[in-house]
Image: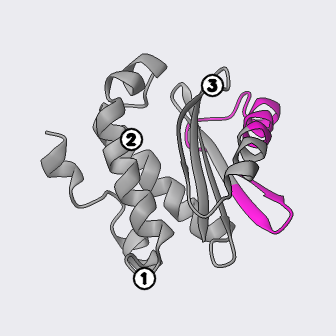
């Protein structure tokens, strides 16, 4: 199950978050844990270089893209390999919407389009019956991206 997607700026402020099946009382814990994880490990990391962590029985894959950090959290069948495919789709969609690795300002300028794209990815990936991992790995950019964002 895909549990969460968080996108933060370089200071650790959350720009976008999507939770799937995470109780409200646990969300604050995940927010602070992921921001601290990024602050400790993302300094000096190249664009789209993937880092992997685990916490309890949960996997976390995270990376930097331009001035933003992206975190994807999953459990069960969403292990680190599957999450790396999911984060690839997310980074490619953001890159396509922004036209390049985003600065925080560019990300916020394209916020609505990015949220639309992210909701489509997270909703379909989060519910495996609607979207297969095979489809994610063979279709790196969401189908609607070309028509919606031109």
- Image quadrant in which you'd find residue 100: top left
The coloring applied to the image is one colour
Quarter holding the N terminus? bottom right
First in sequence: mark 3 or mark 1? 3
Numbered mark located on residue 35 in the image = none
Binning the other alpha carbons within 10 Å of mark 2 as few (below 14), some (14 to 19) or many (20 upward) gives many
Farthest right residue in view:
56
Q: Which residue is mark 1?
A: 129
Label 1 SS: loop
In the image, what residue occupies the spot 30% across and 59% down? 142
Q: Which residue is mark 3?
A: 13
Q: Give the number of the mark in front: 1 or 2.
A: 1
In the image, what residue occupies the spot 67% across and 20% down? 11
Q: Are marks 3 and 2 in contact (CB under 8 Å)?
A: no
First in sequence: mark 3 or mark 2? 3
Q: Give the number of the mark in front: 3 or 2.
A: 3
Viewer-nearest residue: 86 or 15: 15
Residue range (magenta): 32-60
**126 shown above or below 122:** below
Viewer-nearest residue: 122 or 80: 122
| Count of numbered labels shown in the rendering | 3
The answer to whether any part of residue 39 appears in the image is yes
Image position of 138 (left or right of 45): left
């Amino acid at each position: 199950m895909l549990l969460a997607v968080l996108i933060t700026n370089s200071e650790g402020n959350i720009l976008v978050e999507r939770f799937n099946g995470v109780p409200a009382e646990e969300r604050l814990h995940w927010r602070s844990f992921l921001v601290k994880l990024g602050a400790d490990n993302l300094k000096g990391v190249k664009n789209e270089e993937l880092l992997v962590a685990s916490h309890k029985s949960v996997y976390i894959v995270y990376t930097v893209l331009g001035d933003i950090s992206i975190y994807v959290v999953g459990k069960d069948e969403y292990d680190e390999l599957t999450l790396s495919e999911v984060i690839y789709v997310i980074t490619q969609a953001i890159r396509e919407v922004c036209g390049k690795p985003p600065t925080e300002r560019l990300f916020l300028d394209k916020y609505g389009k990015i949220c639309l794209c992210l909701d489509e990815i997270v909703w379909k990936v989060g519910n495996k019956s609607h979207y297969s991992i095979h489809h994610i790995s063979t279709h790196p950019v969401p189908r609607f991206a070309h028509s919606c964002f031109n």
